[in-house]
Amino acid sequence: MLVGFVLQVVSSVADASKIVMQSILMSGTCKLDAPTTVLFMAPACLFAMAIPFLVLEAPRCSEIMTQLPLFLPMILFSCILAFSLNIVVGQTIKQLSPVGYQMVCIVKNISIIVSSSLFLGESLSAQQVVGMTVALSGVTLYSSYKRNLDCFDDGHLLQGFLRVAKRLFGVAQKAS
């Protein structure tokens, strides 16, 4: 269980670092476009993935090489899809910001979990439901904050959210 937790933390830190690096490359003085950013990031990602691959799969390299011709078309198609996905991710980060992209990813992951639970008939534990509720609440609060920055001028978050609620409920009352 500890190994899984450590792997998840390392994966999250690596992904966040990649997203921040992409954002830096596409803004500031560099202002690269999404394909150029992917081209720039690809060697670093390959290096980061090659080391664990060599450590974990080195004993099976001969088996992998003998199976390679059989699976090469599938591998090439997968590479094309991965490249396309990286272009879309880069463009999304450029349009939204790294934090906005992460918020979209949180909602996407929760949607996948809930829909797969519904379609496959799997049950969700109370811990999963609470975790997803907290995550969606965080996304909602962040979105409310970004859409109503004028309510947070004094620097107090709680008072700012109260102003947002008054604004929302005031609009709802006027509409009815």
Image: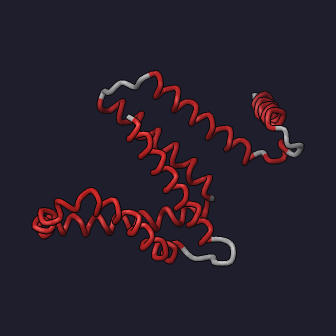
Q: Can you give x and y, in whole percent of width and height, for residue 156 in the image?
A: 84, 38
Quadrant location of residue 24?
bottom right
Quadrant location of residue 170?
top right
Residue found at x 47% / y 64%:
88
Image mark count? 0
When the figure is inspected, residue 52 is found, relative to residue 155, above or below; the finding is: below
Q: Can you give x and y, in whole percent of width and height, for residue 6 in the image?
A: 44, 43
Left or right: residue 110 versus residue 97 is left
The residue closer to the viewer here, 3 or 173, is 3
Residue found at x 63% / y 37%:
138
Residue found at x 72% / y 48%:
146
Q: Residue furthest top?
A: 126
Residue 42 visible in image: yes
When the figure is inspected, residue 149 is found, relative to residue 125, above or below; the finding is: below
Residue found at x 54% / y 55%:
16
Quadrant of the rendering where the C terminus is positioned = top right
Left or right: residue 38 versus residue 51 is right
Residue 175 visible in image: no
When the figure is inspected, residue 15 is found, relative to residue 106, above or below; the finding is: below
When the figure is inspected, residue 40 is found, relative to residue 163, above or below; the finding is: below
Q: Can you give x and y, in whole percent of width and height, for residue 4 in the image?
A: 39, 40
The residue closer to the viewer here, 95 or 16, is 16
Left or right: residue 97 versus residue 39 is right
Quadrant of the rendering where the N terminus is positioned = top left
The colour scheme of the drawn protein is secondary structure
